[in-house]
Amino acid sequence: MIKSITRSNRWWDLPAALLLAIVLTISFSRLLATEWTEGLRIIYIIVYVGLIAGFALGYSQFSTRRVTFFAVAYGLFVIIWQLGTLLGHRILWTERIQSLGGRLGEIIGQLYQQQAVSDNLLFLTLMAILFWALSIYAGYSFTRHGNPWRIVIPVGIVLVLIHSYDALLDSRTLSSGSSIRRWIEEGGKLLCLEMIDTIKGIEGVSGIHLMPIGWESITPTILEGAGLLPRPKV
């Protein structure tokens, strides 16, 4: 028997969606702060378009295979579009695409021959692919599964890696890193409370399993915020 996919099992919450957009904004803002190369500004368009596309694909009735196809197709279009905007004005798009393809081919040839590469196009392309995948997967997981860990963990890993490999760390970036951590912690707490509130409204569900990995001290705060502490006297 084939189980049909319906919109009735889709999950949506506007405050949580805005919080997700903030988390992704923090992530790509940390990349921009590194100033590793020019042109990183295209990432913010890629992230927001990817997030919206992820919301739509997650809410749709498409199967996982079709979602993957559309995610790749949209990604190719958006990434090429944004990379092409870096080439200036009054240039035909056929010429932009030919230029991008030629430069990427030349970079791959230089890498194969173990030569130094001065063109930043390959790095920009890899960052665009990474953040497109993160954003569209986050939006899809949000509406299709309603699972915060599928979203927070990949974004958090990328954020930590960028921060670790940034050679320009100073007191300003260290301070911003502490602020980012506080924002992520507060965002995770609010998202958890939103999900508990949603679960409490589901008929037949009489409990939740809370597992704050590596942050056990937040448990009482979560339970109090969800109205589960103090426990009623029997």
Image (tube, helix red, strand yellow):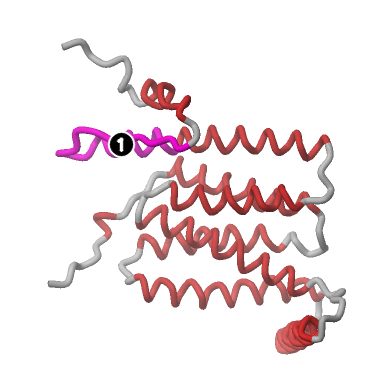
Residue, x 71% and y 89% (percent of image)? 94
Q: Position of residue 196 (x, y in %)?
A: 33, 35
**Residue 174 at least partly seen:** yes
Residue, x 80% and y 76% (percent of image)? 87
Please tell me whether mark 1 sits on a helix, a strand or a loop: loop
Q: Position of residue 19 (x, y in %)?
A: 51, 42
Above-or-below relation of 30 to 123: above
Is residue 70 toward the left or the right of residue 133 in the image?
left
Is residue 62 toward the left or the right of residue 185 in the image?
left
**Residue 91 at least partly seen:** no
Q: Residue furthest left?
A: 1
Q: Which of 117/94 is in front?
A: 117
Q: Is residue 141 inside the magenta stretch? A: no
Q: Which residue is mark 1?
A: 209
Q: Position of residue 136 (x, y in %)?
A: 50, 62
Above-or-below relation of 73 to 185: below
Place residue 96 in its image quadrant.
bottom right
Q: Position of residue 82 (x, y in %)?
A: 68, 70
Q: Which residues are magenta?
A: 191-213
